[in-house]
Image (cartoon, grey):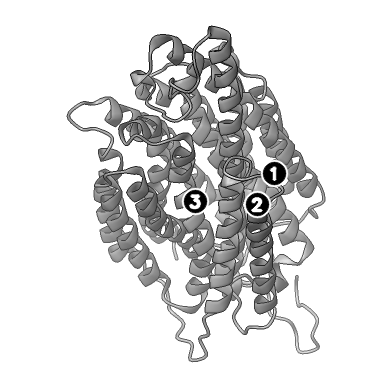
Amino acid sequence: MTHRQILEALSGLLLVLFVAMLSGTIVSVALPQIIGALEGSQSQYTWVVTASLLASTASTPVWGKLADLFDKKLLLQISIVIFMVSSLACGFAQDTGQLIAFRAVQGLGMGALQILAQVVIAAMISPRERGRYNGYLGAVMAVATVGGPLLGGLIADTSWLGWRWCFFIAVPFTVAAFALLAKTLHLPTERRSDVSIDYWGATLIAAGVSVLLIWVTFVGGDFDWLSWQTAAMAGGGVLLLAAATWVESRVKEPVVPLHVISRRTPALAILASLAVGMAMFGGAVFLGQYFQIGRGYGPTAAGLLTIPMMAGVLVSSTISGRMVSRSGRTKPYIMTGLVVLLLGFAGLATIDHETSMVLVSVCMLAVGVGVGMSMQNLVLVIQNTVPLREIGAASGAITFFRSLGGTVGVSVLGAVLANRVTAHIAEGLAKAGIPAAGSAAGSSLNIAALPEPVRTIVRAAYGDATGHIFLISAGITVVGLVAAAFLKPARLRDSLDLPEPDPKGAPSGA
């Protein structure tokens, strides 16, 4: 494809990615108001986010594998329809239970859109040139991440719109993306007669991940760490994933190709992606809550306050993408990004309800720069090691584990935050001489409905507890940094596919 043809097709793909990213970020700032309006709790707040991430995570490797077997364009159009219908359903939700269920369906579409956009780009552009186009990819993701909170806050603050339009607004974007892709995207489709879908593997992976995440969410609150519920859920989740690993090693067309992810470079890149996933999802979700509940800002102001982090993603992903294409090397940029990410998290670990907003903004900028420099480059590392016929499964694998990191991050950080907030509120109420039983301070996020003394205590509790979750994020980033340090330096190839092995069995040019 010529540069012009690539840009035409890329416009539709970027719009698809913009829609998927926007659906997550536009809700992040409006979520405290949404949960307050639907009379939800902190646990339900976390699950509105976790439900979509869980469905997205569990389905990502399936969509990636299907892209290797079937028409990529048709799969992309199907996922757009799923996403559009579920977005409408979320907008009409009448309680938090319905919203969580519809968000899970929306997650299926989100996972498909994110992985299929990357797979299609990989089928059009060589890894070395892909760095240049990944700059556009990172820029669009950053614009969606920056614009989402701003747009969500503005919608939530506009009385004649209301929070439901945070979901309805996705519809015109999806319609435009569908029409644009139908016109501009033209990929050759290989018809394979020996297609084999790994239904058992996909089911076991989804079930294992789901059980473990549900356990993480409720352990320590609804039941103890040492209990029969923990034994049943944690043990059951591990057994399901062990069975999935056995199935993946036996089937003809595995959903997660073990021969790819067991190699040194993909395994290390996946481990580093777990840390980036936690940064990308956990940071955006809980910072919006910190600004509104912990500091008392409105939705629009909270959206504006997230700009430093999103600007960091925008600038660093664009610049590093071009530099990667120029040099053909990824490791220096990944390492630099993860170091900056660690520094940003370390700074955010010190915040409370009185921290200077200048310091908070500087730390958020560092987190954004770190995510922008490392996220897409880690995908490039894996795509550079596999042949074109496996690009979907390999891309799906790293996106799966990155989303898994985000999902686990939101669940774990949400559970930690809920426990710390409860402890801080109980301590604050005791000092103020207010009976905890009648205050309802810990059961509702509708802060405006609380009496003034209780409201002040709840705000301080959320502001002070938020720093603890970023301390955990900093620790996990250290693991990602160590994994990236052991990556072998390699140059990105200029060809779309790996060279075929010669008749004697030795690679001809790898």
Q: In which quarter of the view is residue 3 placed?
A: bottom left
- Amino acid of disc 2: Leu
Front in this rendered view, residue 15 or 168: 168
Residue 378's label in the rendered image is 2
* Residue drawn at (30%, 62%) of the image: 81
The residue mark sitting in front, 3 or 1, is: 3
The residue mark sitting in front, 3 or 2, is: 3
Of all residues, the one furthest to the bottom in this rendering is 193
Q: In which quarter of the view is residue 150 placed?
A: top left
Left-right relation of 419 to 476:
left
The local crowd at label 2, few if under 14, some if 14 to 19, many if 20 or more residues have their Cα within 10 Å, is many
The spot of residue 218 in percent (x, y) is 57, 46
The spot of residue 24 in percent (x, y) is 42, 43
- Amino acid of disc 1: Ile
* Residue drawn at (27%, 52%) of the image: 89
Give the spatial CA distance, label 3 vs label 1: 24 Å
Front in this rendered view, residue 268 or 60: 60
Front in this rendered view, residue 441 or 38: 441
Give the spatial CA distance, label 3 vs label 2: 20 Å
Label pair 3/1, CB-CB below 8 angstroms: no
Q: In which quarter of the view is residue 368 placed?
A: top right
Label pair 2/1, CB-CB below 8 angstroms: yes
Q: Earlier in the sequence, mark 3 or mark 2?
A: 3
Residue 319 in view of the camera:
no
* Residue drawn at (63%, 41%) of the image: 220
The residue where tag 1 is placed is 334
Left-right relation of 266 to 213:
right
The local crowd at label 1, few if under 14, some if 14 to 19, many if 20 or more residues have their Cα within 10 Å, is many
Label 3 element class: helix
Q: Earlier in the sequence, mark 2 or mark 1?
A: 1
Residue 78 in view of the camera:
yes
The residue where tag 3 is placed is 53
